[in-house]
Structure formats: structure tokens, C-alpha cells
Image (cartoon, grey):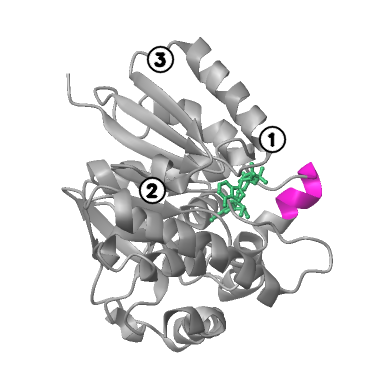
Amino acid sequence: MKQPVRVAVTGAAGQIGYSLLFRIASGEMLGKDQPVILQLLEIPVEKAQQALQGVIMELDDCAFPLLVDVIGTDDPNVAFKDADYALLVGARPRGPGMERADLLQENAKIFTVQGKALNDVASRDVKVLVVGNPANTNAYIAMKSAPDLPAKNFTAMLRLDHNRALTQVAKKTGKPVKDIKKLTVWGNHSPTMYADYRFATIDGESVKDMINDQEWNANTFLPTVGKRGAAIIEARGLSSAASAANAAIDHMRDWALGSNGEWVTMGIPSDGSYGIPEGVMFGFPVTTENGEYQIVQGLEIDDFSQERINLTLNELEEERAAIDHLFS
Ligand code: NAI
């Protein structure tokens, strides 16, 4: 049996946490041969800590063979101690009357503290996934707050958008999701993201040629994927949780265990590829192998795509400008 690895999860008593933790503990994220220790963080509020204890009781009651230990805490330095993986799910939600700028500042406080704690106590190889919104900018803040850790260890979740896009293409073409290759989502996890099936194939055939409908792309596909989060809130009265947890599992599994040559989408600090300024936390097509990701290079960006990429990049640059004073 392998040595156990430490997986930290923040916001562990929340909706996504409730769909996520049991799957990590059952081996769906890191493999059925990988024991795990869960290190769960919640805010220092009695109700949240009590709810966290309830979740831990349920984890206990599953008697997962791979779950070696569970720690519940309100201290980031305890939660991130020697963490090999960190899933930052907890974030400040947008309250009534709260402006986007206030939301950014409130989350900046959380992700500065958590980035520093990761910097101080986590494994030097920790793989960090930020799910809590605004995910890209929160990941950027955590990365900037952890100067002793490699920037490439910090990522943001675009995988839910990727999975949403896969299903829309599957429905349009009438083909199974599993057969769709080489799809990606560029940019910010927000309605500005650009889901791109121009390079996608099904059994070697071009999806773009199969669909051959730019009007559908611009006026149905992109708005459907971009506004899916809002549609789910409207239908369910709560934001997407099981699908978000599922995407987090997909993201971490592929990063840790490899994507076998398949393209996946990860929000990662740009290395300057495709003209995205270095350091911007941007959704890119990547392949993963041996615990590392590589951006898929050499893709042609046509005018429509460039326009969409600029739009989502501008939004990220604006978000970055609103919090960059923290790092100057
Ligand atoms: P939730 O409100 O049910 O749970 C969030 C939990 O985080 C709460 O229990 C809260 O006490 C905790 N929390 C807040 N601040 C914390 C901190 N500083 N440290 C530790 N815990 C903290 O929310 P839910 O539905 O689980 O969503 C979590 C986040 O994920 C939200 O920001 C949501 O917008 C985001 N999200 C991101 C998606 C993506 O694709 N990137 C998709 C869906 C949701």
C-alpha cells in the first residue's frame, strides 16, 4: 500500500464539500490504491464548526478503507500542514447589495491568509485548486501570497465549464460525451469564458464541420455554457454543487494521475502563451503527465476567438488591477 497523502479542503461543511469529501475518501480523486488523510477547514463560527463535525461523523460512518484520518479545524496552519493537495472551496459569497469590487476585496482577505499559510506549512509540491469564486483571481491572490512555492502549483477551476461544454456539444451532435476530444475553455470562470470546439474531434472527425453553425456557436452554445451557473441557481434555488465537486475531482485526478494525452482545461498562471500576459490565471487547453501540466501549443486563433479571448482577459486584468495593490 502507498504512503497516505494529505488532502486539505476548505469550506468543508458547505454544499460542494458535502459532494466532494466522500468521493476523495473513496479514492475517486487519487486512485483506489492511495490512502488519504483529510484536513478540513471551516470558519471559526460555532454553527460551521458544528456542521463540520457532523460531516466528519458521516465520513467515519462510511468506514472508507482508504481514509486514514480526518482532521477538522478553523486554523489554516493546521489544515494546510504538510498538505500534498489543497482544494480551496470556501469563499465569501456575494451578499445582498454587495458590489463586485467588495466581493473581490472580501475574498482577497481570505486568499491572502490561506496563500500565506500554504507558503508556510504545506508540502513544497502541494497542488492547489481554487474553486471558491471569483476562482481565477482568488487563485492568483493565493499564488502571490505564497512566494516560496512554485507559481505553477496554483490553479483555478475551469473544469466545470469544460464539462458543461462537452455535454452541449454531445447533445448537438448526438454523439456520446466520451468520444469528444480536444475541446477547451479559455479564460475566466465567469460568463465571459470562451468555450472553444474548433479543434474538437469525434472519432477523428471535426466537430466544427459536423456542427457547421456559427450562429449556434455564438448565440446558443456560448451563452448556454456561460450562463449555466445562473440557470442552475434559478432552477434549484442553490448553486451547482455536485457538478462542481465532480469537476474538482476531474481536475485533481487528471493533474495527479495524468490525462493520457487527452486535452483538459485548467486555470493556470500564464507563461505568456497565446499572448496572455505572464502570471494571469487563465483557462488553457493542457495535457497532463507525471503530475505536471503542459499548455497545448500552436493552435490558430481566428478573429472571433481572439475577440472572445480578449473579452475574458480584460475581465481578469480588471479583477487583478482591483487587488494588485496588495502585492506592491
Ligand atoms: P457554501 O456556502 O455551501 O459553502 C461554503 C463554505 O465555505 C461554508 O461552509 C463557509 O462557512 C465556508 N467558508 C467561507 N469562508 C471560509 C474560509 N475563509 N475558510 C474556510 N471555510 C470558509 O458554498 P458552495 O456551494 O460549497 O460553494 C463554494 C464556492 O465555490 C463558492 O464561492 C461558489 O461560488 C464556488 N463555485 C465555484 C465553481 C467553479 O466552477 N469554479 C462552481 C460552483 C461554485
Which residue does the numbered mark 1 point to in the structure image? Answer: 46
Q: Amino acid at mark 3?
A: Phe
208 to 58, vertically: above or below:
below
Rounded to the nearest angstrom, the CA distance separating label 3 from label 2 is: 22 Å
**Which amino acid, mark 1?**
Glu
Residue located at (17% from left, 24% from top): 2
Task: In the rendered structure, find residue 64 and report the number of the disc placed on it.
Answer: 3
Q: Earlier in the sequence, mark 1 or mark 3?
A: 1
Of label 2 and label 1, which has the lower sequence position?
1
Query: Dot 2 surroundings within 10 Å: few (below 14), some, or many (20 or more)?
Result: many
Q: Is residue 15 magenta?
A: no
Q: Amino acid at mark 2?
A: His
Q: Name the residue that disc number 2 marks.
A: 251
Taking depth in this image into account, of 232 and 281 the one nearest to the observer is 281
Where does the image place residue 200, in percent across and percent down from the top left? Answer: 38, 61
Q: Mainly helix, strand or loop, the magenta region?
A: helix
Q: CA distance from mark 1 to mark 3?
A: 27 Å
